[in-house]
Image: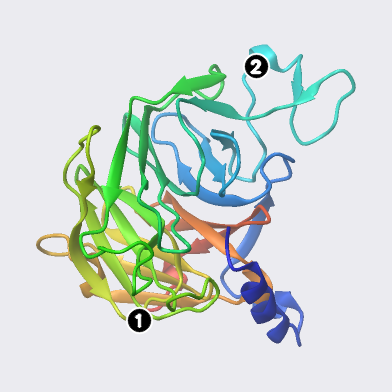
Amino acid sequence: MKAILFVQLLVISLAGSAAEDFAGPVRLIGNVEHAPINEMSGIVKSRRFDGVYWVHNDSGDAARIFAVNRTGKVIIPQYVQQSFYGETVQAGKEVWPGLEILLAANQDWEDIAVDDEYIYIADAGNNGNARRDMGVYILYEPNPRQILSSRILKYLPIRYPEQQEYPAKVWHYDNEGMFFWNDRLYFLSKHRKPGQIAGWEAGAVLYRLDTEHIDRVNLLERVDDNQDITLATGADVSPNGAKLAILSYTALWLFDQPRRGDKWLSGQAYKLDINLAHTKQAEAVCWDDDDTLLITNEGGEIFEVKIADIPAL
């Protein structure tokens, strides 16, 4: 659940010219038209399966993920294609419901990450800053062309070290960006004005997950912050580990890998302003290769950005 009205108002305020006039280097390359994918909130490129991108819906959906190709066409296991259809309705068939995640629930899924073996799903959306049950689902990455469902291996409860009240007095404990780097998961905070779902404050804090307790809470470790990032909605590290991408509604940020430690938000930064009239409510970002990023919005549009077009600050 997002502040949709807020974003719509911003789009309207920019609508004096055609959206194409604001496209710049953010190029539309595809559109997810599979009906059950109706509020895309996360995307990540598989490291195990060629041409596979995992996506999921936002809060309130079933516990499921979908595999799509680069232009948004859904991938359905071949041996059940006689029973299920994708983008086009077919008589006698049911719409493909996605890959079911067993022993999980989508309270507020906001981002997805992978390593060479696992998928990580962050159930960490916290719009009202009152949740005490946030965490991460971990599962072996299934073969999307062969598997209909997959059971989680474990669920890791997480908590912010600074939050002591629910809701917090300072609403800085929402998360929509997660990435995997150097054998650790990282989380990027999204800040609101206290008591205002659609009232925003500048700044983002980077946290690291150091433990994997399944029977008690895992306290996140605060590692860095940046007061210029506003409305962070997605994050991913490049395949070669050289750059971190952070998406917001109005900008795409890059940061060079830290020379030491993991203070990703304090080094050389790059920023490309993006226009809401073109990208609308951009919610997720992933690397396609070391030179190319993909951005998606809740409407299912997929955009491509070359990092050469993102200027240094």
The amino acid beneath tag 2 is: Gln
Q: Which residue is mark 1?
A: 228
Residue 102 at x, y = what percent?
48, 24
Comparing 226 with 157, the one in front is 157
**Which is more N-terminal, label 1 or label 2?**
2
What residue lies at 40% left-to-right and 72% top-to-bottom? 191
Residue 217 at x, y = what percent?
23, 43
Q: Is residue 267 visible?
A: no
Element marked by disc 2: helix
Q: Which mark is residue 280?
A: none
Which quadrant, please, contains the C terminus? bottom left
Q: CA distance from mark 2 to mark 1?
A: 47 Å
Mark 2, Cα crowd under 10 Å, few <14 / some 14-19 / many 20+, is few
Residue 97 at x, y = what percent?
67, 29
What residue lies at 63% left-to-right and 56% top-to-bottom? 298
Residue 293 at x, y = what percent?
47, 57
Q: Is residue 241 left or right of residue 102?
A: left
The amino acid beneath tag 1 is: Asp
Comparing 71 with 156, the one in front is 156
Element marked by disc 1: loop
Q: Which mark is residue 78?
A: 2
Q: Is residue 58 left or right of residue 79?
A: left
Q: Are the residues flagged by discs 2 and 1 in contact, CB closer than 8 Å?
A: no
How are the colours assigned in the image? rainbow
> Farthest residue toward the left?
260
